Amino acid sequence: MPTTGERFERAVSIMARLRGPGGCPWDREQTFDSIKPYTLEETYEVLEAIDNRDWDELSSELGDLLLQVLFYAQMAHEEDTFSIDQVLDRLSQKLVDRHPHVFGDVKAETSSDVLRNWEALKAEEKKKRLEAGGGKDAERKGGEDKNHSQSVLAGVSTAIPALLEAHKLSSRAAHVGFDWPNVEGLFEKLHEETQELQEQLAHVPAPGPHPHASAVAGSRGQQIPQDLRARLEDEVGDLLFVLVNVARYLSLDPESALRKTNRKFKRRFQWIEEQLRASGRGPEQSTMEELESLWQQAKQQEREKQ
């Protein structure tokens, strides 16, 4: 039976064959930029498999995600910039360096101790890279200038999903003491931000805010002044940021929580559609009262199955 190393080497060689002469035309045409969307897609498919607790599917999706790593490494090898060996070496060294409580003499009795050490080590690594690279590292990782390169928020990418970015930014700030002392403070902030949004909503022209089926407020019929729209967006953003912090405070992943709610909404709404379809109708031919009644039935059915 082949070893783990032999299996890995086989995967690396297959990737090289696909990109080599006489290999796959599609694989040979790909670039770093062209496969970025696939990397993101595969990442979310891994998360979905975890959420579903589908372990057989997870093993397959992790393989697809590993393929992305092999793809990038093979293209880099062809351009003589780095190889899969360097990727593995840097990973191993990083794991050892960032776990001095395992591989060294540093003491870390709790997870909080580990996280504090981790952030301090990452900050030291960033400082060394900046000194070696003349500031180019900051430019690559989020565009921070030299004045901001030492910030605890430096290196949080602006390209990641906004919920994840908010979680990372607030976590970094919390690690240096900028945090609510208790969860009650967060709910006070949530109330404050809700009130501020309601104050701005009072300025929306008559007949006031109302939903539009196909687009954002103001795009059909109701015209909202641009400056008011900007203030509303600002307040909604503040509200979302506080909610992300509530999730962080409870050690929950806001992205995962929202994905689960999205699937729950989809599942319940599609059940409503099925019930209406049986009577030859659709949601658009039903009253809101009827839709709400069916929604409550869908919720009740799910509770009974649990």
Image (tube, rainbow, N blue to C red):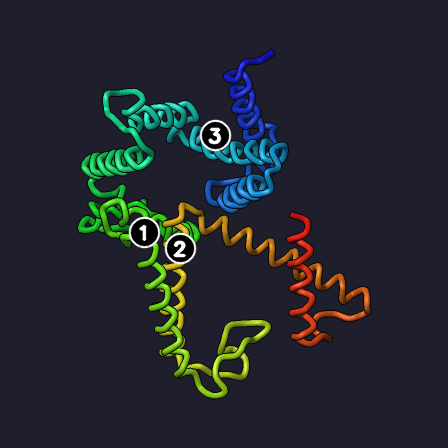
Q: Position of residue 176 (x, y in %)?
A: 23, 46
State which quarter of the image contains the N terminus: top right
Marks 1,2: beta carbons within 8 A: yes
Q: Going from the N terminus, do you reach mark 3 or mark 1 first? A: 3
Say which quarter of the image contains residue 292.
Answer: bottom right
Helix, strand or loop for disc 2 = helix
| Residue ID at (69%, 66%) | 294
Q: Which sits in the foreground, 81 or 219?
A: 219
- Label 3: how many residues lie within 10 Å, few (<14), some (14-19) or many (20+)? many
| Residue ID at (37%, 31%) | 81
Q: Which mark is residue 244?
A: 2
* Residue 18 shows up from this direction: yes
Relative to 111, say whether 288 is above or below: below
Q: Position of residue 219 (x, y in %)?
A: 51, 77
**Outermost residue to the right:** 279
Measured in 3D between alpha carbons, the distance from the residue under mark 3 to the one under mark 2, in whole angstroms, is: 38 Å
Q: Which residue is mark 1?
A: 170
Relative to 86, say whether 148 is above or below: below
Residue type at mark 1 is Ser
Q: Going from the N terminus, do you reach mark 1 or mark 2 first? A: 1
Measured in 3D between alpha carbons, the distance from the residue under mark 1 to the one under mark 2, in whole angstroms, is: 9 Å
From the viewer's perspective, tell me whether residue 270 is left or right of residue 180.
right
Q: Which sits in the foreground, 63 or 35?
A: 63
- Number of numbered markers: 3
| Residue ID at (47%, 88%) | 206
Say which quarter of the image contains residue 73.
Answer: top left
Relative to 212, say whether 303 is above or below: above
